[in-house]
Amino acid sequence: MTDNTTNQAAGGANAIDAATFFKLSGRPESYKAGSCIFPEAQRLSAIAPADARIFLLVSGAVTLTRYGKPISLIMPGEMFGVNSVIHPTSHFATATAMKDCTAISLDPKQFLHELQKNPTFILTLLSDLARRLQGVMPRVIKTGRSTVEPPVSTALNADQISLLAQKLGDPMPARSDAGGTVISEGARAIYMYVLKEGRVHIKVESRVIEVVLAGTVFGEMALAGVTRRSAMAIAESASAWYSIDSKQLVAVTKADPALGLALLRSLAKRVQRAGQLLCESSLDLAALHIPRLNTGAVDGGGGAAKRAQQSALTDYKNLARAFVDQSAEAMAAINQALAASDKGVALTKANVLMAAAAKVGAERLCHQLDTLCTALSVGHKDIIDEVLVAVRKEQQDTSGEIRDFIGN
């Protein structure tokens, strides 16, 4: 099954890589560990800071935080500060050098100049944003927070939609009545779409996770290298949309770089929205909708009741029994490392414990340990202490539930 569309596939386009693109006009800069690369705005506004730049990290590591809470860790080869060139806005997050690092930056004028000469970079930028959204959305969904309201901000106004249609050769838009399927889950991913009119629901496992309004881009994962759709899109009202493949996106960007970037605006806003929801979620809320012990995660069998082989259940009980002792020892080692101010050892122990927790299906503990690993990477003591309290409690509660399950 393929996407419902009126356009013919135009094939792929090879994108210039980020390192090559940034070196064309960018300047390398060095930052000492702990230094602030740019600060977050206390109140977000549609005014970019005077020193707005997009960065490519060459070496080291950079943490993005808001209100002191970790959002993501930027590693070499990844970009940050993207919003300042896609649309004028103040910085949502604070970027801090986790260790000595080198980055190359471009101001908005330099970026647009190089983008017009190298329009295939729009695909690299899209892939970077899409991967970031893919990484953060599962965490947001598990917190139980709604990503539906407010709806995704529109990327294009009516004039820009008309201009886009002209650049695409004035094709007839695809249409659907209310309730019609725009994208089928599992379908081949070929195009991204711009909603011309109407409203579309993006759904995962029958749950509406986003509402798309007219002028908004959706289905962009197709141009980021994803071959199959992981979500479905349903027309909430009578809707019409244009389809865009990678070659068309490059052509539009070459003719009008600002219009090309506008097409990615809603994707950037969704990344920001997801980060905001993570920051607003308390540690307890973040685990609320995650099962403490999912025994079906051990072998994909759908739970202990569905395991017909008694030997499989015995193996699981032995694994779980050993985990109770292992997790207690790991927590003691983490506490000891932090008491000695050795975050590196604590991070290693937390990752080992997280892998062991995954094997026994301790999903809630895995979630809390993932948060602890991020906090350890950021390095703020107050955040680490807060997360560690939640991890200790979850390890104890998980061990208790395992004992109940295995009968010890």
Image (cartoon, grey):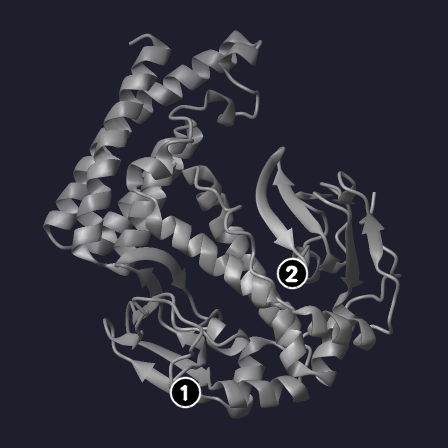
Q: Is residue 298 left or right of residue 261?
A: left
Q: Residue furthest left?
A: 339
Q: Is residue 180 visible?
A: yes
Q: Is residue 17 left or right of residue 284?
A: right
Amino acid type assigned to the residue bearing label 1 in the image: Pro
x, y percent for residue 250? 73, 76
Which residue occupies the foreground of this view, 330 or 113? 113
x, y percent for residue 165? 80, 71
Which residue occupies the foreground of this view, 357 or 70? 70
Q: Is residue 82 visible?
A: no
- Mark-to-mark CA distance, 1 and 2: 35 Å
* Residue at screen point 43% across, 27% down: 361
Q: Is residue 279 left or right of residue 246?
A: left
Amino acid type assigned to the residue bearing label 2 in the image: Thr
Dot placed on the residue nearer the N-terminal end, 1 or 2: 1
Which residue occupies the foreground of this view, 242 or 237? 237
Which quadrant of the structure image shows residue 377?
Answer: bottom left
* Residue at screen point 50% across, 14% down: 304
Task: Return the residue at label 1.
Answer: 28
Q: Is residue 75 above or below residue 261?
A: above
Disc number lying in front (1 or 2)? 2
* Residue at screen point 34% across, 37% down: 285
Which quadrant of the structure image shows residue 366?
Answer: top left
Q: Secondary structure at mark 1?
A: strand
Neighbourhood count class around disc 2 (C-alpha, 10 Å): few under 14, some 14–19, many 20 upward: many
Task: Return the residue at label 2.
Answer: 216
In which quadrant is the C terminus drawn?
Answer: top left
Neighbourhood count class around disc 1 (C-alpha, 10 Å): few under 14, some 14–19, many 20 upward: some
